[in-house]
Every structure is written in structure tokens, then in C-alpha cells.
Image: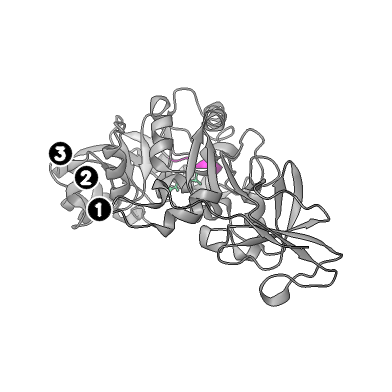
Amino acid sequence: MASEYIELPPDDSSTVNSNNQPSLMVDQASLNQHITIDFLTLDQNIEAITNNVAPNTQLWPVIKDDAYGHGAIPIAKRLAPQVHGFCVVRPLEGVILREAGIRQPILVFEPPNERNIAVYTSHNLIASVSHIRHLDLLESGCSYHVNIDTGMKRLGAPIEELPVLTQAIQKRKDIYGKGVYTHFYKADDPGSTTVVEQLDLFQRLQSQFPTEWLRHTANSGAIFHYAKQLPLSFDAVRPGVCLYGYSAGNQAIDSLSPLLSWQSRLVHHQPVKKGESVSYGARWRAPRDGWVGVIPVGYAHGLPRLLSNQMQLSIEGTLYEQVGSITMDFTLIWLGENKIPLGSPVFLLDADQLRANVWAEKTQTIAYEITTRISPKVPREYVG
Ligand SMILES: *Cc1c(COP(=O)(O)O)cnc(C)c1O
């Protein structure tokens, strides 16, 4: 039994970047794997979000970190007609969206600093303010929301500091307060009392700010686990992970579906005899004579190595076991006696059985980390 290997096609334009230098980043990844993002599913997830919040609630989708790995610009362009604003973490993310033609308000979660303060005005970004220092930094004409801490203890203004902050706000007539918000720290857990506590606190504190300011609190967990019982929609919500089809916690949400599928193809076959090991460390042995297939995807592309011997892949709708250690650029699949043709599509993630939250559970993390870690060198394609 001879092994075979698909020869990669010779260099084409996609492997040469604008400096005419061969680009390894593009080469191997683009030829044999890609991510597909389904916009129709995004539309359905938006509908599921809208169904959960009070009528007329504004949507301010969170598209930080390249829309959790899905691509901030295409996602923003698709969402733009249906939403009021966008949220990002760093000002540079906002700059990139502005340069791509996004016109909606963009709220930046990270507090401003001396080095980046100018882009808030040059690119019309909304700052998050949680200290008088931030107010002092803001250039004339800039807009901001006040972030108040109700328990997250990350970036929000501590309650004790609010009197000083509200006083300072009144003195700066040349900048524009537009909103006040807080962030829930345990809304992914449907049975937590902390959401009610934070909400009560926010209700009390928000009254110190002008009534025309936008009020917003809810992340995905709040929208799907609490918004039916609690008045936490206010004027706007900040959905993040739910847009991309995942729930914030372990509780699956039927009305959401992942946008993302990750597809590669079989590039190699390897015959194995019963008892022979495969890959580094001999962490798997063939239960009988058969075939091991190879896909050119590894942990360098964001496939967690911790999934070694623990994940399934789908070929033509049938699930196969991944076997042996996942390596930097290649991953092995037990095909049994089934010598599946080279070039066959192999799915790592899809919207059915192969979901990022399954990987997350097996690697003790959350779907957020799985999708944000898929390497940018894996090309994204958009359908729908
Ligand atoms: C990331 C983030 C969100 C969105 O959270 P999800 O759990 O993904 O919905 C909302 N607000 C703030 C302040 C955030 O940092």
C-alpha cells in the first residue's frame, strides 16, 4: 500500500503579496482550508436577539477582536442597515471600521490614553469614560459614554468616584456625554442572583445622568437568560457571542446557530497496521489495519492541541475520529478501512455536531476563545 500526497499547485498570484514576496502566510492555508461565514445565519441570530429584548431597543453589536474571529469589516457591513451602533475594544478597531466606510456610532470600551486620544475626534469614535483623567484627555467635540462598575471590577468607574466624575462632567461643556452603561459579570449563568443585584445598583446610579443619555447593560448572557424577567434592555443592548451563534455559558440556546464552519481537505493517506502508533508521542494506536488521513491544519492555525484524540471531523456527512497528537500544521484522522479519496472536503467545525462550544468544553474554555484564536491566515469566505 503506497501512501499518496496531493501536490500543492505551483505558485499563483494568491501566494505573492503586494511586495512581490512569496507569502507563506497565504500559501498553505488558503489552498487547503478556509472558514465560511454564513450571513443568513447571522440574520437569524439577530432576529433571535430582537425577539428577546424590549421593542425599540437599539442593537449595538460587539465586534471586537475581528468580530470574535469572524471578520469585523464584513460583519459590520452586513449588520450596518439593521443596527444603531457598534462596540469595539481598541480605538484602532474603530479606525479600521471607519476606513471601511462604517458610518454608525462606534463605542470603544478601552479607556482613552494620551497616545491614541486624537483618533477619537479624527475618526468620530465614542470614548468610554470611567475616571476624570479620561475626561481631561478628551479633545473638544468628542463624544463619550460613562462606564460604571456594578461588580465586574474591571474598567468601570467605582461607585465612590461617581460624585467627582459627575461634577467634572458638568464642567466640560465642549465634549458630549451620550450614554451610561455597566457590564454584567455572571449573566452566562441563568441562575445567578448577581444580575439582579447589578441591575438594582445600575438603576439607582444611572439616575444621576441626563435622561437623554443612552442607557445600556445587556451582553449575550443577559439577553438570553434574563431579559424576559428583568428590565435590562434599557435603550440598547450589546450582544457579542450570541451574534456568532454561541451561548455565553454552558446552557445551549436553540434559537442561535453558529455562522462559522471550518473546512479543509484530505491531502494525504497513510496505511497503518494494527497496533502501530501515529504522530508524536505515540498517543494513539490503530485498533486494526486501516488508513489514516491527513489534513493540513494544526495548532498553528488555532486548532487546540488539547483536542488531540478528543475531536471528531466530518467527511461527506459521516463523523470520523481525530487520532494522535495534533501537530503544528497537520492533523490525523482515523478512516478505518475506508480509503477516502484525496481532496475530499473535511469539516472541523460546522453548525451541526461540530460546534466550537463542544471544543470549548473539552479544552476547558469557552467558545469565545476558540473562535478568536483561529489564525487570521485561515481565509474567511462569506456566503448568503
Ligand atoms: C465583550 C463585551 C460585551 C459582549 O459580551 P458577550 O458575552 O460576548 O455578549 C458586552 N459589553 C462589554 C463591555 C464587553 O466587554
Circles 3, 2 touching at the beta carbon (< 8 Å): no
Earlier sequence position, callout 2 versus callout 1 = 1
Q: Considering the whole magenta stretch, tell me its main secondary structure.
A: loop
Picture coordinates of residue 62, whole percent (x, y):
43, 42
Identity, as a three-letter code, of the amino acid under mark 1 = Pro
Identify the residue position indicated by label 2 in the image: 120
Closer to us: 15 or 227 = 15
Q: Quadrant of residue 131?
A: bottom left
Is 373 placed left or right of 118 in the picture? right
Identify the residue position indicated by label 3 in the image: 141
| 97 relative to 270, above or below | above
Residue at image location 31% in from the left, 40% down from the top? 97
Identify the residue position indicated by label 1 in the image: 112
The range drawn in magenta is 217-221
Identity, as a three-letter code, of the amino acid under mark 2 = Tyr
Q: Quadrant of residue 336?
A: bottom right
Closer to us: 87 or 13 = 13
Q: Is residue 252 magenta?
A: no
Residue at image location 17% in from the left, 52% down from the top? 137
